[in-house]
Each structure stands twice: as structure tokens, then as C-alpha cells.
Image (tube, rainbow, N blue to C red):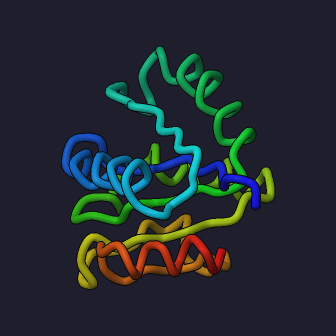
Amino acid sequence: MARKRIFISYDHENDARYKNLLHAWNKHNDFDLQIYNGSLHIAINSQNAAYVKSQIRPMITWCSYLLCLIGEDTHKSAWIDWEINTAVENDKRLIAVKITKDCISPPAIMNRGATWALSFNYEAIKKAIDGA
């Protein structure tokens, strides 16, 4: 089976450790993923936003899936909504992974047919990825 190409969308200030854990699991367990994530430290309404989007859009387009890590502040991120909407516009499958069950989901991922993991643990995430 071909490796799944996954773009990770996450809150870079608060949830990078969870993205790093996904990378570690991918190296040492039976995930078989090609993972890309674009690190953004620029406001979506900044003068550089158009350039950043021009660099990220091809990566989302290249991937087959967008995996959104949903942490405490993810629902407030205009970038994450943009990444999700870009994935949907390009017919990518969505995988939503809540860090904890009580985290609020970003509006863009709701009612979009995402496959969900309601907690951040290896088994739940593997099941969501395999089911996407």
C-alpha cells in the first residue's frame, strides 16, 4: 500500500509537541506516512500572508489528507481555517485529532466529513488515519 501523504495543521505556539510526537510515531511504529507541516509565525492578515499561502497551498495540494491537531486555541486560528478550507477545495480527506476531548473544534472542520480521534493517543489516531 502506498504511503499516505498527510499535511499537519496545528497551533504552532501551543501544540508543536503533539506534531513532534506524530513524527516520532511515524519513525518508530507502524504508521506509514509522508508528513508535511508548514510552520507559520506570520499573521494571516500580514503583508507576507499571500507569499506564505503560495508556499503552503502546493503542499496541501500534494498531500492526500489534512490532519488537524485540535488543541485549546486551535478554534481561534484563521490560518488553520484557511488550511482546512484549502484542503476541502482540493478534495482532500480530513482527519481531526483532539488533544483532549473538551477542545473546541475549528469551525472550518465541522460538517466536512472528517474522520475523528477524540483523544491524542496512538491507537485512536492510527484508527482515524486508517479510516480516512
- Residue at point 64% right, 54% down? 85
* Residue 128 in the figure: left or right of residue 21: right
* Residue 41 in the figure: left or right of residue 86: left
The quadrant in which the N terminus is found is bottom right
Task: Provide residue 76's location: percent of width, then percent of height.
Answer: 33, 57
Q: Quadrant of residue 12?
A: top left
- Residue at point 39% right, 31% down? 39
* Residue 120 in the figure: left or right of residue 31: left
Asked if residue 104 is positioned above or below residue 19 in the image, the reply reads below
Nearest the viewer among 2 and 41 is 2
* Residue 19 in the figure: left or right of residue 86: left
Q: How many marks?
A: 0
Asked if residue 35 is positioned above or below residue 117 in the image, the reply reads above
Nearest the viewer among 95 and 32 is 32
Task: Provide residue 124's location: percent of width, then percent of height.
Answer: 40, 81
The quadrant in which the C terminus is found is bottom right
- Residue at point 38% right, 61% down? 69
Task: Provide residue 84's location: percent of width, then percent of height.
Answer: 58, 55
- Residue at point 22% right, 65% down? 72
